[in-house]
Amino acid sequence: MRLLYKKDYGRAENLYHQANREIMLKVGMRNQLFYESTYLISQIYQAKGDIEEAEAYSTLLPPEFHRMTPSKPSDDIKNATKLSNCVL
């Protein structure tokens, strides 16, 4: 998230794609961690002004996730740092 505050969208996007590959390999696409990372990339594209791409990623989220507001990292995110310290 720091990269978004610094408006380093390109780097944030690259890190997302690296992390998401690991997430899909390790826990799959039906895991809370995948949904949270997908939500994050949609926010990155929204910050870049690419609403069409942001909406495309949002379609990967289950309906109940659209009503959730992430307030703190989930246990899956904490555990993901153990998956690949170089990515996260």
Image (spheres, rainbow, N blue to C red):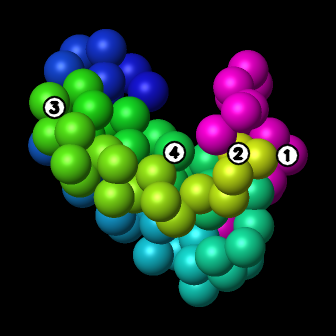
Of the residues under marks 3 and 1, which one precedes in the sequence?
A: 3
Relative to 73, 21 lies left or right: left
Q: CA distance from mark 1 to mark 2?
A: 16 Å
Quadrant of residue 83 within the rendered picture: bottom right
What segment carries the magenta color? 66-84
Would residue 41 be counted in the magenta stretch? no
Position of the N terminus, as image quadrant, is top left
CA neighbours of label 1 inside 10 A, class few (<14), some (14 to 19), many (20+): few
**Closer mark to the observer between disc 4 and disc 1:** 4
Residue type (three-letter) at the residue carrying disc 1: Asp
- Which mark sits nearer the N-terminus, 1 or 2? 2
Q: Nearer the viewer, mark 1 or mark 2?
A: 2
Task: Say if residue 87 shows up in the picture.
Answer: no
Looking at the rendered image, the disc whose residue lies closer to the viewer, 3 or 2, is: 2
- Is residue 62 rendered to the left or right of residue 17? right
Which residue sits at x=73%, y=32%? Answer: 68
Of label 4 and label 1, which has the lower sequence position? 4
Identify residue for label 1. Answer: 75
Residue 40, disc:
none
Give the label on residue 39, or none: 4
Residue matched to label 3: 48
